[in-house]
Image (spheres, helix red, strand yellow):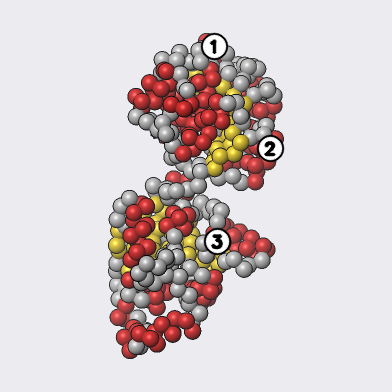
Amino acid sequence: MSFIPFSLHATLMANLSEQGFSKPTPIQKETIGLAIEGHDVMGLAQTGTGKTAAFLLPILQRLGQTRRIPRALIVVPTRELAEQIRAVFEQLGKGTGLRWAMAYGGVGINPQITKLKKGVDVVIACPGRLLDHIERGTVDLSKIEVLVLDEADRMFDMGFLPDIRRIVKKLPAERQTLLFSATMPENIRSLARDVMRDPKTVEISHSMPPATVTHALFAVSDNQYKTPLLLALLKQIDRDSVLIFTRTKYRAERLTRQLISAGHRTTSLQGNLSQGRRKAAMDGFREGTFRIMVATDIASRGLDVSSISHVINYDIPAHVDDYVHRIGRTGRAAKDGDAFTFVTPDDADLVRAIEKRMGSRLARRILEGFKESEQPNAHLKKAKPAGQAAKAHKSSGQRRHFGPPRSGGRRR
Ligand code: ADP
Ligand code: MG
């Protein structure tokens, strides 16, 4: 699909092609039409998915020509973001004659006042300075038709929600509100309920992990070496909070016990915890009481802890989507993160599937000083005939969701 179905003005189409935007990103595809129709829209998508154009294009389309009175107000948490939006506004709005003013702190207010006085169509603002302008009477918000709240979750993190509510009170009730966010904490939901009218919600699931994550595979010849490898790895890496994934609840419980007995402050999150214990585990992990959390895929949905420096896949996930989801727990808010995956020879097909999705080969790494042959149980594996080894897996409660490829069989 191209931008054609949105019937944008010719100038905007020309600007899009000049920018090399040949087709809308998923969030743009879902939100632009709704916004042009005049709906309030709540757009949820991770950073880097093209949210700026998702709200700027409908605004540019709607404003048409300059009238030199603010008709669109874009509120963002930081001045860096305000400047980024201005840059995109200049690119996509080239040749429209629409005018803008900035309203953020940390710089003199007088040049902003001068610019506002000259008459602008769009105001790009941070909450504090905008309130300052409102109090001084240097910005006229009586004709605002469109309000954009961008990076709503960050505004909440930075304590701006009370300011936002004060600003919204100064705007015409008859307006369109567009709210964009990477996550949707309850506070943003409740803000949306108060300031939006029948909003359409568009949520784009994370199909690719953040670019700030470094991926690596660590090979083990057999499952029994995963815990010794993990303990050795934990000693070597420079870590903040570490989130470790196992394939089953049983394996999560067992690994948690092993880590605790090795002296690591560890909590776990798996499906059969009560709501209270779940919350205690989450809070303890978020606050740093526990530096390590062992989790299963289902339990980790929605987990948003900004201090996770490492995601370790003790077991490779059975689905590529789960890999993307797990990895998305680190590298949040543009922080760096490492994603390590332990792989056995049985995991080769899954590794290939993940690499295909990532579009590149994942780095293979070897942990310095770690030798399987030096592990206490190294001799057992060789001594066991194959049949018994399989039985041993079972009796230890370990369920295998996938094994060597079965011809024609669907694997999970
Ligand atoms: P977000 O606000 O979701 O973090 P941005 O609006 O900053 O994302 O866009 C991220 C990047 O994607 C920018 O470099 C932007 O130029 C680019 N981009 C946005 N829309 C498109 C598109 N339709 N086609 C190609 N690139 C795009
Ligand atoms: Mg953005």
* Coordinates of residue 264 in the picture (x, y in percent): 49, 71
Q: Quadrant of residue 95?
A: top left
Q: Is residue 383 above or below residue 162?
A: below
**Nearer the N terminus, badge 2 or badge 1?**
1
Amino acid of disc 2: Arg
Pair 1/3: label in front = 3
Question: What residue would you read off at disc 1?
Answer: 68
Quadrant location of the N terminus in the rendered image: top left
- Front residue of 373/398: it is 398
Question: What residue would you read off at disc 2?
Answer: 193
**Nearer the N terminus, badge 2 or badge 3?**
2
Q: Is residue 246 visible?
A: yes
Count of numbered tags: 3
Residue at image location 37% in from the left, 67% down from the top: 408
Q: Quadrant of residue 235?
A: bottom left
SS for callout 1: loop
Residue at image location 37% in from the left, 71% down from the top: 406
* Coordinates of residue 241 in the picture (x, y in percent): 48, 59
Amino acid of disc 3: Ile
- Front residue of 194/206: it is 206
Circles 2 and 1, Cβ within 8 Å, touching? The answer is no
* Coordinates of residue 160 in the picture (x, y in percent): 61, 36
Q: Is residue 233 above or below residue 70?
A: below
Question: What residue would you read off at disc 3?
Answer: 298
- Front residue of 388/131: it is 388
